[in-house]
Image (cartoon, rainbow, N blue to C red):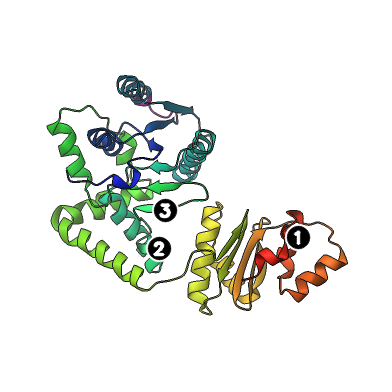
Amino acid sequence: MNLDFSAIKNQKNLLAFSAGVDSTALFFLLLEQDIPFDIAIVDYNLREQSKEEISYAKELANKYSKNIYIKNIEILNHSNFEKNARDIRYAFFKEIIHEHSYENLITAHQLNDKLEWFMMQLSKGAGLIELIGFNEFEQKETYKIYKPLLNITKDDLEIYLQKNNLKYFIDESNFNEKYKRNFFRHNFSDKLLEEFKEGISKSFEYLQNDLNSMNIQYKAIKKIEELEIFLNQHDDNLNIRTIDLSLKKRGILLSNAQRNEILKQKEITISNKINISIYENNIWIAPMLKIIMDKKFKELCRINKIPKNIRAYIFSLDINLKDLML
């Protein structure tokens, strides 16, 4: 299996591990190329087999001298289990990363996952960015998420494990079609990949290249603490994409109604947490604060064209307004 892990070769990495096909294969593929990494695993205490998976994770960590981080959790609200489980899992990973200064979180998402995501987004209405939302690298606030297996199918990973006589587990919940992802997997994506793997992989590559060629400016032109300033691209579609990506990094997923209100009002508070202002040539995003500001500061903000709903955060950090000049 021809994989290039050179991008993380000399960095501090944390592997999201589950003992299933994907993460077990990735564990040994990383070992083969002498990539430094530790592992983190979550036990949701839903299946008896999960104890065996935790035991196997400990066995691998001990055998190959890896640090292992384990979280035991029981989710009481099963109404949206997949989302709740994901939120808990990534909050756990983030906590470890911050505490131990990891640079990358490595996940074992593969081509089946990418196609499932594509089809799920397609079914509910999405643009190009959402449709190909699985990228090799995803920048978070203080670390990157790295997905090195996106061009490899689950079948290929299982063949690799079997060929090398490597132990792995099959999660029985993956066959339960009450979970939307499983429904798409068993009825659509797996069947498509069996027949058209090469073409689908190439199509994703072409789509990503097309998106890159559009040269859309999503990176903040100024960032101080939790204040971000972006270029106003004077295009509602591009602006809302920029805002959407910034808020996702902050753990906020926008609804269509919220997106429409942002574009309509231009200056708005979202989820009682984040203030957004589309003002002249820039987009301003900062945490919402309610504090008393002196008149002199307010006047300086007016002169320097600082949006009203952003001023409190700037004042709270005592940011020099000269540092915000673009």
Q: Is residue 104 left or right of 110 when viewed as pictured?
A: right
Residue 128 shows up from this direction: yes
Q: Residue at x 52, y 50 (%)?
A: 141
Of residues 146 and 5, the one nearer the viewer is 5
Say if 234 sits above or below 243 in the image: below
Residue 319 is situated, as x and y percent measured from the top left of the image, at: 72, 58
Q: Is residue 167 left or right of 79 when viewed as pictured?
A: left
Residue highlighted by disc 2: 130
The alpha-carbon separation of the residues under discs 1 and 3 comes to 30 Å
Please tell me which of labels 2 and 1 falls first in the chain: 2
Please tell me which of labels 1 and 3 falls first in the chain: 3
Residue highlighted by disc 1: 312
Q: Residues within 10 Å of mark 1 (few under 14, many from 20)?
A: many
Tell me the mark number nearer the camera, choosing from 2 and 1.
1
Please tell me which of labels 2 and 3 falls first in the chain: 2
Please give the label number shown on residue 277.
Answer: none
Residue range of the region highlighted in magenta in the rendering: 44-50
Q: Residue at x 71, y 70 (%)?
A: 306
Say if 22 sits above or below 128 in the image: above
Residue 291 is situated, as x and y percent measured from the top left of the image, at: 81, 56
Q: Residues within 10 Å of mark 3 (few under 14, many from 20)?
A: some
Of residues 58 and 304, the one nearer the viewer is 304
Please give the label number shown on residue 138.
Answer: 3
Residue 80 is situated, as x and y percent measured from the top left of the image, at: 48, 45
Instruction: Please name the amino acid that badge 3 sits on.
Output: Glu
Instruction: Please name the amino acid that badge 2 sits on.
Output: Glu
Q: Residues within 10 Å of mark 2 (few under 14, many from 20)?
A: some
Q: Quadrant of residue 226?
A: bottom right
